């Protein structure tokens, strides 16, 4: 597709379960970012990928959060042993160069019961 | 203190009004400035991207950057009901990674 694609668009799960969120960036974009948007906290950076490497993971809130990127394209954000405070919208963005504007997907709305 | 401050509003204006949205930032090293528009249940959509101080115009939208005051603005002329959305200012928080630091977002409602 032409834009950043994220799946699923909505995810409801029980506390303690693991979840995987997927991001398909714009074709050819080498830089990929994950952000989290929650009420009261706004939109916060989680992790940055350049190719398949993640030189900046400084925004990951705990070791329950991890992410990988394969083939310089698709990225997966995994949250283990989910907690209620993990409920948020998880947004992915990509760009052809880290100095250029980032283009966002519509996010995955995660609800932890 | 947050690195980027933005009044969350909400801001309500009549159709046709000029809208002024503003942000301040704390770090003079920030060099790239952006405005995104976000509709409900959608991802942020880039509106304006600027580097230097001064004005940048695109249709009904004008972005203004004042680096001496660490102040960025977005003006919307002839506002339309379709402009009703949340507007987010953002800066590049790191030249090495390009990660963005966002303001809290201002919710705008344009009433017909």
Image: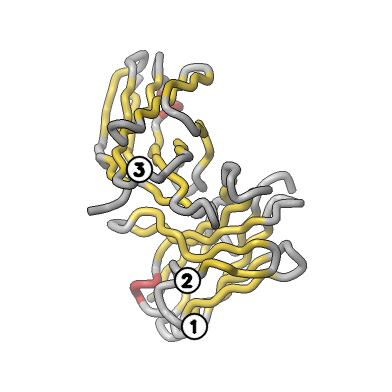
The residue carrying mark 3 is B28
> Can you see residue B36?
no
Residue B67, compared with residue B79, is above or below; it is: below
Q: Residue at x 40, y 16 (%)?
A: B77
Residue A110, compared with residue A83, is above or below; it is: above
The residue carrying mark 2 is A12
Q: Nearer the viewer, mark 3 or mark 2?
A: 3
| Label 3 to label 2: alpha-carbon separation | 41 Å
| Label 2 to label 1: alpha-carbon separation | 14 Å
Left or right for B5, reference A59: left
* Disc 2 chain ID: A
* Disc 3 chain ID: B
Local SS, label 1: loop
> In x, y percent, where is residue B25?
31, 43
Local SS, label 2: strand
Q: Residue at x 45, y 69 (%)?
A: A58
Q: How many marks?
A: 3
Residue A52, compared with residue B85, is above or below; it is: below
- In the picture, the disc for residue A80 is 1
> In x, y percent, where is residue A92?
56, 57
Corner quadrant of residue B88: top left
> Can you see residue A4?
yes
- Closer-to-camera residue (B68/A63): B68
């Amino acid at each position: 597709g032409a834009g950043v694609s994220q799946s699923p668009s909505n995810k409801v799960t029980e506390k303690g379960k693991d979840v995987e969120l997927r991001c398909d960036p714009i074709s050819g974009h080498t830089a990929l970012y994950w952000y989290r948007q929650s009420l009261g906290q706004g939109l916060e950076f989680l992790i940055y990928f350049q190719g398949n490497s993640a030189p900046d993971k400084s925004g990951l809130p705990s070791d329950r959060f991890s992410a990988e990127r394969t083939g310089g394209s698709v990225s997966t954000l995994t949250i283990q042993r989910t907690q209620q405070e993990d409920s948020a919208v998880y947004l992915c963005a990509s760009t052809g160069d880290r100095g250029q504007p980032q283009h966002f997907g519509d996010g995955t709305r995660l609800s932890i019961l | 203190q947050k690195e980027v401050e933005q009044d969350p509003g909400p801001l309500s204006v009549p159709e046709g009004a000029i809208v002024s949205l503003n942000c301040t930032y704390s770090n003079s090293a920030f060099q790239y400035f952006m405005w995104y528009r976000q509709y409900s249940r959608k991802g942020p959509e880039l509106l304006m991207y600027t580097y230097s101080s001064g004005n940048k115009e695109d249709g009904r939208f004008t972005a203004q950057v004042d680096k001496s005051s660490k102040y960025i603005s977005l003006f919307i002329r002839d506002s339309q009901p379709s402009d009703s959305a949340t507007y987010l200012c953002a800066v590049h928080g790191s030249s090495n990674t390009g990660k963005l630091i966002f303001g809290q977002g201002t919710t705008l409602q344009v009433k017909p």
